[in-house]
Image (cartoon, rainbow, N blue to C red):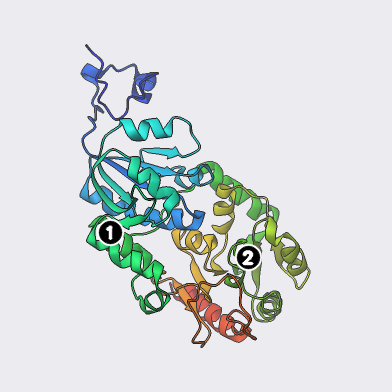
Amino acid sequence: MILKYDCSHFPGDHPCSFHKLTGVKCDTCPDYSPIKNKILIIKFDALGDVLRTTAILPSLRKAFSDAKITWLTKANAKDVFVNNSLVDAVWTIEDPVTLSRLMTEEFDFLIHPDASPSSAYFARCANAKIKKGFSINEKGCVFPLNNEAEEWFELGAFDDLKKKNKKTYQQVIHEIAGLPYRQSEIIIELTESERAFAAQFSNKHELKRFDFVVGLNTGAGGRWKYKKWTLQGYKELILTLNQKYNCGILLYGSTEEADRNVQLSKVGANVIDTGGDNSLREFFSLISLSDIVVTGDTLALHTAAALKKQVICLFGPTSANEIEDYGRITKIQPDLDCLVCYKMDCDFVPNCMESISVKTVMDAIETAVSRRSSS
């Protein structure tokens, strides 16, 4: 048989890209790559968390250079992996074939770093020689698969331990997987068409007339309302930026922030609403246009970090310590004992986000501008 069906490039039901391109067949193909190690990553809760978990991929590739890496996620997160050469396949739980594949294919190594019951069922079903992270037992109880996962498990269960934690999420998932951590980066690789989309937006709004661009991500999703800064805070910040700098101001958000961003777009000069109905990849492209991004602890934070922007992140109910700063992220927290509460509601007046002053945010922006000027 000429066909080498164990090649990682062969899809099974149609010719591979190398044959289509050059007509080469398996017996003389220089790109023949037999599948050796197979790795499965299961992570599909919250877009921002899926994105920041991509920081584990460079370490996996270094440890297993010849591995075929498959990522199991939800359909809404699939586009996170567009143009990402470190992932060979992306499966979604919505695909009716996924469960059959999960139980049929054998993996050498499974990483499931999330103690979520919904994803733990998939980790339980997966056919893997080595499993690390979390699974679920016959009684429906999530449990850690290895000692390194126990610490993360307890942090999620006990508020006092969560507050004391000093490890970043990236460090934790590397430890769970048994990999050395060297501050590997979150991964977004824009395509040429996405860069063209960003350039078209820039040209339309003449962004090059500004000395630099500040992006304000004004929301934080529907689940954590206290992740987002106050409307009044953003209004005053826009006015202060207008007074001090010749900078463009881009407003980011989803449909949930549409009314808020319409209001903010009318506050001062040079404010441009990027819209709330952009696709995930369009959102990534638009974030790429900002030099400095002000945001809460949400998808925009991890996007801006992946795109290597200067970031000012405002924290309240969630842990600032779990965010890897990469030397580019300034973390702002009010001086309150109740931080890292992870509460959905709060009756404190002022609450954590109301306690962050415009001056504090502006000071951080000025520092970021100075860094940018000296680089």
Label 2 sits on residue: 219
Report x, y in % for residue 180.
Answer: 23, 61
Alpha-carbon neighbours of circle 2 within 10 Å: few (<14), some, or many (≥20)? many
Q: Residue at x 55, y 45 (%)?
A: 194
Judge whether 275 appears above or below 309 on screen.
above
Marks 1 and 2, how far apart in space?
31 Å
Quadrant of residue 16 within the rendered picture: top left
Quadrant of residue 128 within the rendered picture: top left
> Which residue type does callout 1 highlight?
Ile
> Is 311 situated left or right of 201 in this image?
left
Task: Determine whether the residue tagged by mark 2 lies in a helix, strand or loop.
Answer: loop
Question: Which quadrant holds the N terminus?
Answer: top left
Task: Determine whether the residue tagged by mark 1 lies in a helix, strand or loop.
Answer: helix
Report x, y in % for residue 344.
Answer: 58, 70
Alpha-carbon neighbours of circle 1 within 10 Å: few (<14), some, or many (≥20)? many
> Is 76 situated left or right of 136 in this image?
right
**Residue 108 disc label:** none
Judge whether 23 appears above or below 135 on screen.
above
Report x, y in % for residue 86.
Answer: 34, 45
Label 1 sits on residue: 176
> Which residue type does callout 2 highlight?
Gly
